[in-house]
Image (cartoon, rainbow, N blue to C red):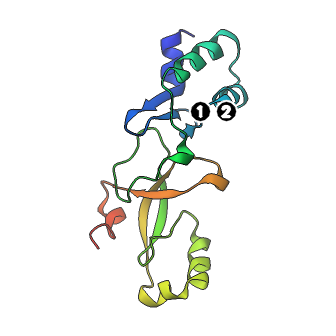
């Protein structure tokens, strides 16, 4: 595959946050050896293709997503990152994509249930696909159903 086509197939650099995003996995990539590991393991790249792609990736000096504060809730979507249908607590802004976490949240934080019994539907993004590292923020949606909490 030609270098330009290879780059267009696998990576995008999101300049506002200096993030390198794998467009196939819809996740951010940490700088350093983990970029090579990602493309070797997840996409089976090797040889000249891998070398060319890595050279392109390292030309940007990407930031570590762990070091970047999460975007504000209801900000614009970050292109190429996965968008999830989820929920946000109307009191403390806890976010989840798993319905069962709503009930656990109310059990752990009864004040949230006292003040509001609603989790609002939202669309969420995360820098990572890995469940251990997922931290969500709500993104603006063109569907008003997902922006019920935005003006509150």
Q: Gap between marks 2 and 1, in whole Å?
A: 7 Å
Query: Residue at label 2?
Result: 34
Q: Position of residue 106 (x, y in %)?
A: 56, 82
Q: Nearer the viewer, residue 96 or 58?
A: 58
Above/below status of 62 relative to 93 = above
Asked if the residue under mark 1 is in contact with the one under mark 2, i.e. CB atoms within 8 Å, the reply is yes
Above/below status of 134 relative to 115 = above
Q: Position of residue 79 (x, y in %)?
A: 41, 39
Q: Quadrant of residue 91?
A: bottom left
Label 1 crowd (10 A; few <14 / some 14-19 / many >=20): some
Q: Nearer the viewer, residue 133 or 146?
A: 133
Label 2 crowd (10 A; few <14 / some 14-19 / many >=20): few
- Residue drawn at the location 58% of the way across and 66% of the way down: 98
Q: Nearer the viewer, residue 127 or 147?
A: 127
Secondary structure of residue under mark 2:
helix
Query: Quarter of the image containing the N terminus?
Result: top right
Query: Quarter of the image containing the C terminus?
Result: bottom left
Task: Tell me how many marks there are.
Answer: 2
Q: Quadrant of residue 138?
A: bottom left
Residue 90 relative to residue 106: left or right: left
Q: Which mark is residue 87?
A: none
Secondary structure of residue under mark 1:
loop
Q: Position of residue 29 (x, y in %)?
A: 58, 36
- Residue drawn at the location 38% of the way across and 57% of the way down: 72
Query: Residue at label 1?
Result: 31
Residue 127 visible in the current orientation: no
């Amino acid at each position: 595959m030609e270098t330009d086509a290879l780059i267009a197939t696998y990576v995008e650099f999101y300049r506002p946050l200096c993030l390198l995003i794998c467009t196939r996995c819809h996740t951010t990539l940490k700088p350093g050896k983990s970029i090579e590991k990602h493309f070797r393991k997840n996409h089976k790249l090797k040889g000249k293709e891998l070398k060319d792609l890595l050279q392109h990736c390292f030309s940007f000096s990407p930031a570590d997503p762990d070091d970047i504060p999460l975007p504000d809730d209801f900000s614009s979507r970050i292109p190429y990152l996965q968008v999830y249908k989820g929920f946000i607590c109307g009191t403390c802004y806890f976010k989840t994509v798993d319905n069962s976490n709503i009930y656990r949240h109310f059990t752990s934080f009864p004040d949230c249930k006292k003040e509001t019994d609603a989790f609002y539907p939202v669309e969420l993004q995360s820098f990572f696909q890995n469940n251990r590292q997922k931290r969500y923020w709500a993104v603006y949606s063109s569907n008003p159903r997902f922006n019920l909490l935005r003006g509150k």
